[in-house]
Image (spheres, rainbow, N blue to C red):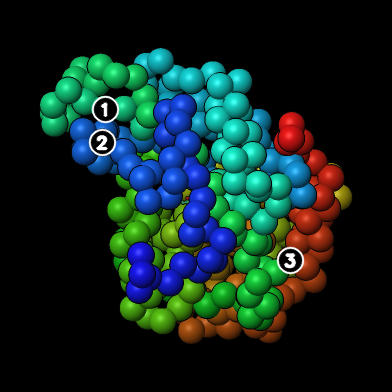
Amino acid sequence: MSNITLPDQRNKDIKVWIDGTLYPRQEAKVSVFDSVVQGGDAVWEGLRVYDGKIFALDEHLERLQNSAHAMAFTDIPTNKEIKHALFETLKANGMRDETHIRLTLTRGKKVTSYMDPQVNQYGPTLIVLAEWKPPLNEINKNRQKGLRLITSSIRRNPPQCIDSKIHHNNLINNIMAKIEANAAGVDAAVMMDIEGYVSEANATNIFFVHGGNVQTPFADSCLPGITRGMIIDLCHEHGVDCSEKRISMAEMYSADECFTTGTMGELAPVAEIDGRKIGDGEMGPVTRQLREYHKKLTETTGEPLPF
Ligand SMILES: Cc1ncc(COP(=O)(O)O)c(C=O)c1O
């Protein structure tokens, strides 16, 4: 660790929950026999803690349970057990704000390195990795100016291959797309679906505004993001015209506004895609307004921490 720079020094001595035990960072390890090592065979959620509350906890736990069930995990911990693990981890780290949690449930250890889940005899492994990560929009004011994106050559998996509604750890497509974005010197990559329509960005969902109408791709090939769902609901609640639809590349370039959504990065305006300026290249009024509505939700809702 001596010559490694952490993005946030406060994470140097964090404790990580692995199957009922809190380990210091240096000792937080899973077995080489674990399914996540053997095949990325795990499901996960990213959560945020704002001012003593875990935001949208029930929605995240529902998606985790559904993903684990779809992958035929056995002995899945109950939401009560998972909440206990989350609370204990946050308490041990003194975290009540500015925190991001990577919650992972793997199929567990195997008795030998076969792919076959029948050699999983230990039950799943639950990992709670909570880190200090203040909201990106607050620590990086450059994000106000808007992200620069490219279109990736890597397609998002269609449901014929793997259902994007399963929030699993096989993220290779998305990682390959991000590598293209890094090589191009931009912030992220837009992934198209197998038919060539917009799906999402490599780690976030994507929205466009066309003449006051907010649009986002159907969740056929993209993750049905919790933040995405909130934005659709907020639009309906506040009388903003919003629809899910197929969005082509040319429609993407000609949007008045574009923004990405995700628990980690919240709502981030997009200034440019493939060198084409989006709108006037500044954060637009609809994006700004939706950011305000979302911020209010983070301030007023969430599961209170019991400590
Ligand atoms: C591929 C992908 N898209 C979108 C999102 C955003 O989802 P959420 O709003 O639930 O954080 C994530 C976050 O996990 C993701 O991995």
Which mark, by number, is residue 203?
none
Q: Residue at x 67, y 56 (%)?
A: 98
Which quadrant holds the C terminus? top right
- The location of residue 41, given as percent across then percent down, is 30, 35
- Residue 287 badge: 3
Report crowding for label 3: few under 14, some 14 to 19, many 20 or more residues within 10 A (C-alpha): many
* Label disc, if present, on residue 31 of the rendered structure: 2
Which is closer to the viewer, label 2 or label 3? 2
Q: Residues within 10 Å of mark 2 (few under 14, many from 20)?
A: few
Q: Secondary structure at mark 3?
A: helix
| Residue at x 70%, y 69% (from the top left corner) | 138
Q: Is mark 1 within 8 Å of ligand 1?
A: no
Per the model, the C-alpha gap separating discs 3 and 1 is 44 Å
Residue at 45 percent across and 78 percent down: it is: 186
Instruction: Indicate which label's residue lies in the foreground, 3 or 1.
Output: 1
Disc 2 versus disc 3: distance between alpha carbons?
44 Å
Asked if residue 281 can be seen in this view, the reply is yes
**Residue 239 left/right relative to 189:** right
Residue with the mark numbered 1 = 109
Q: Earlier in the sequence, mark 3 or mark 1?
A: 1
Q: Which amino acid type is shown beneath numbered disc 3?
A: Thr
The amino acid pointed to by label 1 is Lys
Residue type marked 2: Ser
CB within 8 Å, label 1 to label 2: yes
Residue 208 appearing in the image: no
Q: Quadrant of the N terminus?
A: bottom left
